[in-house]
Image (cartoon, rainbow, N blue to C red):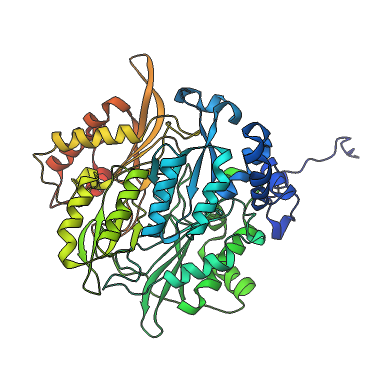
């Protein structure tokens, strides 16, 4: 009996995998509009058009691809048009959400500024930005209400004193987080100041490194408090002491939060100080060459690390980019104290540093100018911003410490803040951000004031972090907070109102936590913005009532019954 072949061709059991858009594997042909935009013209080139055309002819002359894309390479985003409710954020096109004003991000690697630079920031804010200024959790300063016509003058003032906005945004190597106590602390293992400066001079603004799959975040510290949130960066170099090779860095890669949070992983490699610039550059090139470009939501380094694993990543780093093996090394020692550096502490030279907390990072041009006056009046020339939306005044003489503390407090900055004023962060929110769904800064500030009164009877013997974010992107690191709040529109008694999804029990490595971890989401727990103080008070009192043997909030939150957390 003859069996006739089917006239229909056999179908493959699986479809061939689509290319990821990895340059080293698939070639450099763009696979989406973002990649086409970058291939058509390097984002760094837009500066010439801003200075010669857009600033002269005005907002309406800006090419849409420059406005919504390339201008980010120079720290510029259009801010949100006032009056658009959060429920419409996902429904509108970028041009419908955008105002005719910009947010300008000033890149401050290591968070370091001189008194003169601080004064220039303050003057730019008061003259061009309606006295706005926010300290971000990336140690940058962000200004709002910037007109395109004023951008060249602002750049000229910044660059005249050694500041820049180069690659402050965009698919680039962003600002490098650095220890606010670099070169100052008596217990510092290694000072990363020169390393950060070398990276800046050699690689920031290099067109060959200005077309990455997405942003690339870096952090470097030699301080034993582990004060640069190293677990959430694409690359981190963390100071360690090798038993045979001496002081150097432990290498971490692939951290990032947003809608698909992933904590960074150790590669187990020890980086000698003289190798650190080369290793940083090599990891960046791996991301450029092998990072996923086809789908923008999968284009961060963490997705490549998840597929490769740490062992393969290290092998590619050593064999394809360094041409040698790195020695194995030890992990960082447990942190010795909080990394926000709030309070008054002695430096290694016998002078003092004063760490102060604004309310959720919000300051102003006037405050920055007053801080510059203060520093100069006591003979200091240095201030550092921190990755926790705080600031640290350095080099304060012993006899002037009390005066400095009083004058800082007069500016509304707290050197001995309440637990909530110290440990609450908030992103920009709907006031200015086009991605936001809810208001954050004012909501968080109101909650702090309420909680300071409501929980005054409690003696909180451990830090308690409260991070407030206006959308799912986690700029305020909601998944690594004790109480993390993700903005969304929720329904309360049939009415749609601004609110938050709640994450509980997250945290980074700290004196109270051996390992970092992400918070849990509790099914059905959503809190209206106006009810935020009520919810936080309720859950904190439950923790204080039910904890066992000094249990941290995070430990308790991960074991607590959902009914208690609701």
User: Is residue 373 visible in this depiction of the protein?
Assistant: yes
Q: Where is residue 439 in the image (x, y as percent from the top left)?
A: 38, 30
- For the residue pair 447 and 376, the one nearer the viewer reads as 376
Q: Quadrant of residue 399?
A: bottom left
Q: In which quarter of the image is the N terminus?
A: top right
Q: Quadrant of residue 454?
A: top left
Q: Which residue is drawn at 47% across and 44% down?
A: 258
Q: Quadrant of residue 352?
A: bottom left
Q: Where is residue 188 in the image (x, y as percent from the top left)?
A: 31, 72
Left or right: 7 as drawn, with respect to 158: right
User: Is residue 339 visible in this depiction of the protein?
Assistant: no
Left or right: 83 as drawn, with respect to 55: left
Marker count (numbered): 0
The vertical placement of 505 against 491, above or below, is: below
Q: Which residue is drawn at 64% across and 71% down?
A: 320
Q: Where is residue 66 in the image (x, y as percent from the top left)?
A: 66, 41
Q: Residue at x 18, y 41 (%)?
A: 543
Q: Which residue is drawn at 62% across and 33% down?
A: 59
């Amino acid at each position: 009996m003859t069996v006739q072949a089917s006239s229909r061709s056999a179908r493959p059991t699986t479809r061939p995998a689509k290319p990821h858009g990895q340059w080293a594997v698939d070639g450099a042909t763009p696979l989406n509009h973002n990649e086409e935009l970058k291939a058509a013209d390097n984002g760094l080139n837009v500066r010439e058009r801003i200075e010669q055309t857009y600033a002269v002819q005005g907002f309406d002359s800006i090419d849409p691809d420059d406005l919504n894309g390339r201008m980010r390479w120079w720290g510029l985003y259009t801010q949100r048009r006032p009056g658009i409710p959060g429920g419409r954020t996902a429904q509108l096109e970028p041009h419908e959400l955008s105002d005719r004003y910009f947010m300008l991000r000033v890149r401050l690697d290591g968070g370091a500024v001189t008194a003169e630079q601080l004064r220039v920031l303050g003057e730019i804010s008061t003259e061009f930005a309606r006295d706005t200024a926010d300290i971000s959790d990336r140690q940058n300063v962000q200004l709002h209400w910037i007109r395109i016509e004023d951008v060249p003058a602002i750049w000229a003032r910044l660059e005249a004193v050694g500041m820049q906005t180069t690659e402050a945004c965009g698919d680039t190597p962003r600002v490098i987080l650095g220890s606010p106590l670099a070169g100052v602390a008596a217990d510092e293992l290694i000072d990363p100041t020169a390393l950060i400066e070398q990276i800046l001079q050699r690689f920031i603004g290099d067109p060959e490194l200005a077309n990455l799959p997405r942003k690339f975040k870096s952090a470097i510290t030699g301080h034993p408090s582990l004060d640069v949130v190293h677990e959430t960066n694409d690359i981190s170099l963390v100071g360690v002491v090798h038993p045979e090779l001496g002081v150097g860095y432990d290498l971490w890669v692939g951290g990032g939060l947003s809608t698909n949070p992933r904590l960074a992983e150790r590669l187990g490699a020890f980086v000698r100080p003289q190798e650190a610039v080369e290793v940083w550059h090599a990891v960046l090139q791996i991301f450029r060459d092998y990072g996923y470009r086809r789908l923008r939501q999968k284009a961060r380094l963490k997705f490549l690390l998840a597929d490769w694993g740490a062992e393969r990543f290290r092998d590619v780093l050593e064999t394809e980019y360094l041409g040698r093996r790195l020695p194995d090394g030890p992990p960082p020692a447990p942190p010795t104290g909080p990394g926000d550096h709030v309070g008054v502490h002695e430096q290694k030279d016998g002078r003092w540093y004063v760490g102060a907390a604004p309310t959720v990072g919000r300051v102003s041009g006037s405050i920055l100018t007053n801080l510059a006056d203060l520093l100069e009046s006591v003979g200091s020339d240095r201030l550092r911003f921190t990755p926790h939306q705080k600031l640290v005044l350095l080099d304060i003489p012993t006899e002037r410490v009390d005066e400095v503390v009083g004058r800082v407090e007069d500016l509304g900055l707290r050197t001995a803040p309440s637990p909530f004023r110290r440990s609450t962060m908030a992103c920009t929110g709907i006031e200015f951000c086009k991605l936001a769904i809810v208001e954050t800064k004012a909501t968080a500030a109101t909650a702090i004031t309420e909680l300071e009164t409501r929980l005054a009877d409690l003696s909180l013997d451990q830090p308690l972090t409260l991070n407030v974010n206006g959308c799912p992107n986690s700029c305020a690191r909601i998944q690594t907070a004790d109480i993390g709040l993700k903005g969304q529109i929720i329904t309360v008694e049939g009415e749609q109102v601004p609110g938050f999804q709640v994450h509980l029990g997250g945290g980074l490595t700290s004196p109270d936590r051996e390992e970092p971890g992400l918070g849990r989401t509790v099914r059905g727990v959503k809190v209206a913005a106006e009810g935020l103080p009520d919810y936080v008070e309720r859950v904190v009192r439950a923790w204080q009532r039910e904890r066992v043997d000094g249990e941290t909030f995070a430990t308790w939150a991960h074991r607590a019954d959902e009914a208690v957390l609701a």
